[in-house]
Image (cartoon, helix red, strand yellow):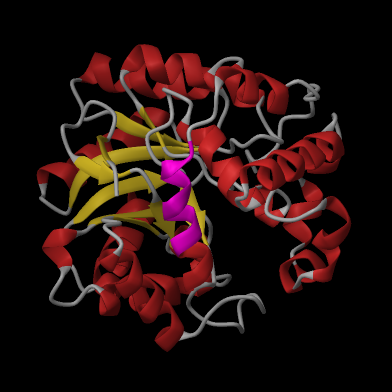
Amino acid sequence: MEYTTLGDTGMEVSRICLGCMSFGTSDWREWVLDEEAGIELVNRALDLGINFFDTANMYSDGESERVLGKALEGQRDEAVVATKCYFQMDEDDPNSGGLSRKAIEQELENSLDRLGMDTIDLYQIHRWDDDTPIEQTMRALDDAVRRGQVRYLGASSMWAHQFAESLHTSDRLGLDRFVTMQNHYNLLYREEEREMLPLCEREGVGVIPWSPLARGYLARPHEEFDATTRGQSDSHAKNHPYFEGGGREVNERVQELAAQEGVEMAQIALAWLFSKDTVDAPIVGTTSIEHLEAAVEALDIDLSDSDVEWLEEPYEPVPVSGHD
């Protein structure tokens, strides 16, 4: 395993973060693993040297956090644990979502309880809240750091001007600022290169992209995607513009280079992200130990500059996706 400093925190994380959206309960989404399989996946990740785990309160309605916490019993100090809040957790309680002080404080307590932990290493806002002033959100998050419930703060998909406003607000008020950006970024979706990634680089913010394999579309030939359980059941994959803007040709080039190098398509897609200096650790979600092991092996693949250029060449601008 390779390790890197997460942004400018000084904290070391594995170059791969295990995304925990894929376990909890299949009652939530049919491709999700149950508790036993989820714990097995976490344990294998630890064996492979992965120390970075990302979940969210809304994954399997909290079950993902509970499973992760159980899997890390007795191994908590080895791990860097990240979770998120924003989406409404209880349809009968409007204050169980959003980024008001009440929502943040009660959902943070709930996450800590499910995880069985006293402190979360990285607490992230899952999206931007148009209904709450950013000053209130940042003060509530800063208070959580000062109470010792949270070590670092992070954000996820939003417009670059919103992220810049949040950083400026923290600096102006003397509050802890966001140290990471968990954004939508992969070979098929590169709109973040226009503004967000340069902003993160300038501000020393760590980048931990979600959906590095485009919800599996970069892991198999175009025509095979719909044959998978996730391809058939995950409507979110079809809502992203992966099939637009030269997407099919990018998929075919990933397939061709993988065959040439004798590796898997997913490994080429991950190697492309590892080649980007702005990326600290892609968040890899998987339901398979075999796929997890293959992701780790992708760290050994060195793409040449010409390989990277060739993979990127067919890309065309697509609509911004992932902020909602």
Report whether residue 241 is seen. no
Position above or below: 299 against 318:
below
Q: Position of residue 241 (x, y in %)?
A: 80, 39
Left or right: where does residue 249 sit relative to residue 155?
Answer: right
Q: Position of residue 139 (x, y in %)?
A: 26, 35
Q: In percent of the image, x 55 and y 23: which residue is there?
A: 304
Q: Position of residue 105 (x, y in %)?
A: 29, 55
Report whether residue 45 is seen. yes
Image-quadrant location for residue 118: bottom left
Position above or below: 202 against 193:
above
Position above or below: 286 against 43:
above
Left or right: where does residue 147 sit relative to residue 43?
Answer: left
The one nearer the camera, 282 or 310, is 310
Left or right: where does residue 91 sit relative to residue 8?
Answer: right
Q: What stretch is highlighted in magenta?
A: 293-301
Classified by dominant secondary structure, the portion drawn in magenta counts as helix
Q: In percent of the image, x 48 and y 54: which residue is there?
A: 295
